[in-house]
Image (cartoon, rainbow, N blue to C red):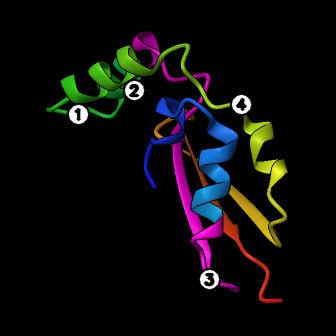
Amino acid sequence: MPSLLAVMPDRVAGLQMLYNAVKKGGHLVIIEPTEKMNIKNARQYAKANKLKQRHWLCIWAFARQKNIVDPSIYETLNAEKIDFYSVLGGMLGVRIIKKSSS
């Protein structure tokens, strides 16, 4: 579920609804910008990685800066396991949330 929680009025309730839709033993993948998502970092990343189509990243950074999901909301889930991966130079966080099979 890429970049959805940040635009929900009740992020905890939205996350819980997504998690409840996952079957037992299944996984939920959440991709959200981190506090590092800003125009300066987006431009630096695009330049360093020689992105030819860098405008999308700068537009995304502009739209999402200061609208970041508090990572503590994931603690509200009774998940068996939550793995976190940092991508795009730390501007995005990927969480893979495993629901208990019991």
Numbered tag placed on residue 72 in the rendering: none
As for residue 39 lying within the magenta part, the answer is: yes
Q: Earlier in the sequence, mark 3 or mark 2?
A: 3
Query: Which marked residue is nearer to the observer: mark 3 or mark 4?
Result: 3
Residue type indicated by callout 2: Tyr
Vertical placement of residue 81 versus 17, above or below: below
Query: In which quarter of the view is residue 22 placed?
Result: bottom right
On the picture, is 55 further left or further right than 19?
left
| C-alpha gap between disc 4 and disc 2 | 23 Å
* Pointer 3 local density, CA inside 10 Å: few below 14, some 14–19, many at least 20: few
On the picture, is 91 further left or further right than 48?
right
Instruction: List the residue tagged with mark 1.
Output: 51
Secondary-structure class at tag 2: helix
Instruction: List the residue tagged with mark 2.
Output: 45
Residue type indicated by callout 1: Leu
Vertical placement of residue 7 versus 29, above or below: above
Q: Earlier in the sequence, mark 3 or mark 4?
A: 3
Vertical placement of residue 5 versus 19, above or below: above
Secondary-structure class at tag 1: loop
Instruction: List the residue tagged with mark 4.
Output: 70
Image coordinates for residue 5, horizontal then vertical, percent: 54, 40
* Pointer 2 local density, CA inside 10 Å: few below 14, some 14–19, many at least 20: some
Numbered tag placed on residue 23 in the rendering: 3
On the picture, is 97 further left or further right than 78?
left
Q: Earlier in the sequence, mark 3 or mark 1?
A: 3
Query: Which marked residue is nearer to the observer: mark 3 or mark 1?
Result: 3
- Answer yes or no: do the residues labelled 1 and 2 have beta carbons within 8 Å? yes
| Camera sees residue 85 | no
